[in-house]
Amino acid sequence: EVQLVESGGDLVQPGRSLRLSCTGSGLTFDDSYMTWVRQAPGKGLEWLGFIRSKTAGGTTAYAASVKGRFTISRDDSKNIAYLQMSSLKTEDTAVYFCSRWVPTIEKIDFWGQGTLVTVSS
Amino acid sequence: QSVLTQPPSVSAAPGQEVTISCSGSSSNIGNHYVSWYQQLPGTTPKLLIYENNKRPSGIPDRFSGSKSGTSATLGITGLQTGDEADYYCGTWDASLTAGVFGGGTKLTVL
């Protein structure tokens, strides 16, 4: 059974940084494109970015709304993907989901349960 | 404003059928596969349809997907109260070089 478990969500002040982690099991993690999606309270899904597998170059792609502030990385030895968020704003308050993107058919097939990030003074 | 356009809400009676549209452009739906996700209240999204019209294992054939040009449609037949959820379309956008979702459609089964 595939499991993606996010952690690191917290209450943080505007302007601060926070790092989220996503631990995967039951999947070939190092072959997977790991993606982050968020959902603000009462709002829809917003794709944030992904990191390609190492064999695909390990490069990243980001939504324009977070490019330059958010960084996705991975540690395949631990089956963990990270989302480093900096210069946080109140509008970054959301549930952050880790997921797996399948690039050949452009789908997200597995989702984590999400972790809540609240940005407030 | 979402790149993909969906109606905010749809409704129908139990047993009836409903369709949810998703409109995009040539940089996304027109040249890429469309997926649909179901998010039941208080839960995580779940893949419902992929590659425009394929269902993952375990998804009943009451759910179907289609694509024509720069638009896609999710169809649900034999509506059940348990189908009440938010539904999102998603795909890749080559111009944005990013994944994109529709704004979501809330399905109410009256």
Image (cartoon, grey):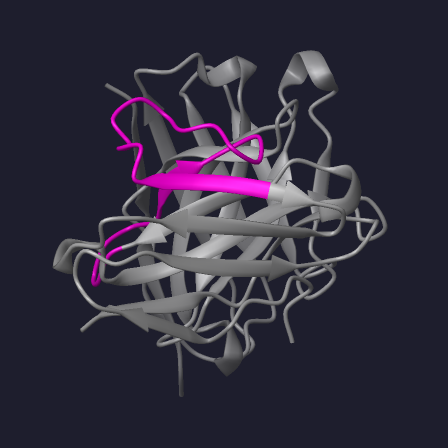
Q: Residue A33: x percent and y percent?
A: 57, 27
Quarter of the image for the N terminus of chain A: give it: top left
Q: Which residue sits at x=65%, y=76%?
A: B1
Q: Quadrant for residue A102, please give it.
A: top right
Q: Residue A80: x percent and y percent?
A: 43, 29
Q: Main secondary structure of the magenta part?
A: loop
Write down the region rendered in magenta.
B40-66
The answer to whether residue B13 is above or below residue A67 is: below
Specify whether B74 is left or right of B43: right
Q: Residue B34: x percent and y percent?
A: 60, 41
Q: Which residue sits at x=72%, y=58%?
A: B24
In this orientation, which residue lies closer to the viewer: B41 or A48? B41
Q: Quadrant for residue A28, please give it.
A: top left
Q: Which residue sits at x=68%, y=66%?
A: A65
In this orientation, which residue lies closer to the viewer: A74 or B90? B90
Specify whether A33 is left or right of A96: right
* Tally of numbered discs: 0
The answer to whether residue B42 is above or below residue B99 is: below
